[in-house]
Image (cartoon, grey):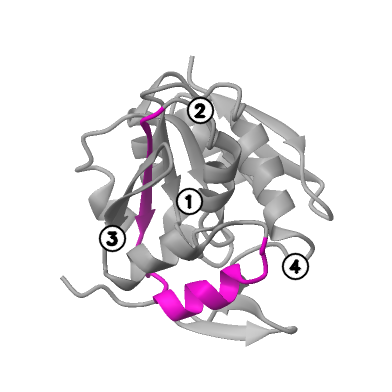
Amino acid sequence: MDHQKASIDWRDGGIPVSARFDDPYYSLQSGLEETRHVFLRGNGLPERARAGFHIAELGFGTGLNLLATHAALAQCPGPIHFTSFEAFPMAAPDMARALAAFPELDAAPLIAAIATGATRFALGPLDVTLILGDARETLPQWQGRADAWYLDGFSPAKNPELWAEDLLAEVGRHTAPGGTFATYTAAGAVRRALAAAGFDVARQPGFGRKRHMSAGVRP
């Protein structure tokens, strides 16, 4: 199946912005630090990582979250599973241009895999699976359960489909007992939907100019 590629506008000296959702792919302040603050620390990583641990993500985007996870978990015993759901995959040249902003990360193996069209590949201890297509269709069919979720769609105001109550219910259904989620958004509707999905939801200090983010655990 040929999936519709992401359409990118480059602004402010090279920030990738989704033309479809009019939203940047990463923080204009420090995308890598925001990823570490929200998704890694928000899910208790790398401390919780162990062989067989499963991370899942809504919104693969530039692959920044994957590379930050790889850097943080490089010394962990594998395999650690990383499954990401993406409706509009970014072309390899765009991904290379976006990730050039983070020279401390080794993006070359990821870009090489994306260039071949691979949806299963390894990065160090990470066993990576990309599931392409609308998550509203692909997540209900997924057989896995995550120990940690990165909820990283474009903003709820601009990409409401990825934050809909029925989709977040599927996130809850595909979470192992004791599993967690973290997201940059503190939107009330998102927090209520995640609570309805079975998570104990907490509002936490956000990154940079964002006052709050959300994280939670499924008891």
Considering the numbered disc 3 on the image, is that residue within a helix, a strand or a loop?
A: strand
Q: Which numbered marker is on residue 132?
A: 3
Q: Quadrant of the N terminus?
A: bottom left
Amino acid type for the residue under numbered disc 2: Cys
Q: Which numbered marker is on residue 163?
A: 1
What residue is disc 4 on?
A: 28
Amino acid type for the residue under numbered disc 1: Trp
105 in relation to 187, above or below: below
Which segment did they paint magenta? 78-103
- Looking at the image, how many numbered discs can be counted on the residues? 4
What residue is disc 2 on?
A: 76
Task: Give the alpha-carbon distance from disc 3 to disc 4, as whole Å.
Answer: 26 Å
Task: Give the alpha-carbon distance from disc 2 to disc 3, as whole Å.
Answer: 27 Å
Q: Earlier in the sequence, mark 2 or mark 3?
A: 2
Instruction: Determine if residue 6 is in view.
Output: no
- Residue contact at pointers 2 and 3, CB within 8 angstroms: no
Q: Earlier in the sequence, mark 4 or mark 1?
A: 4
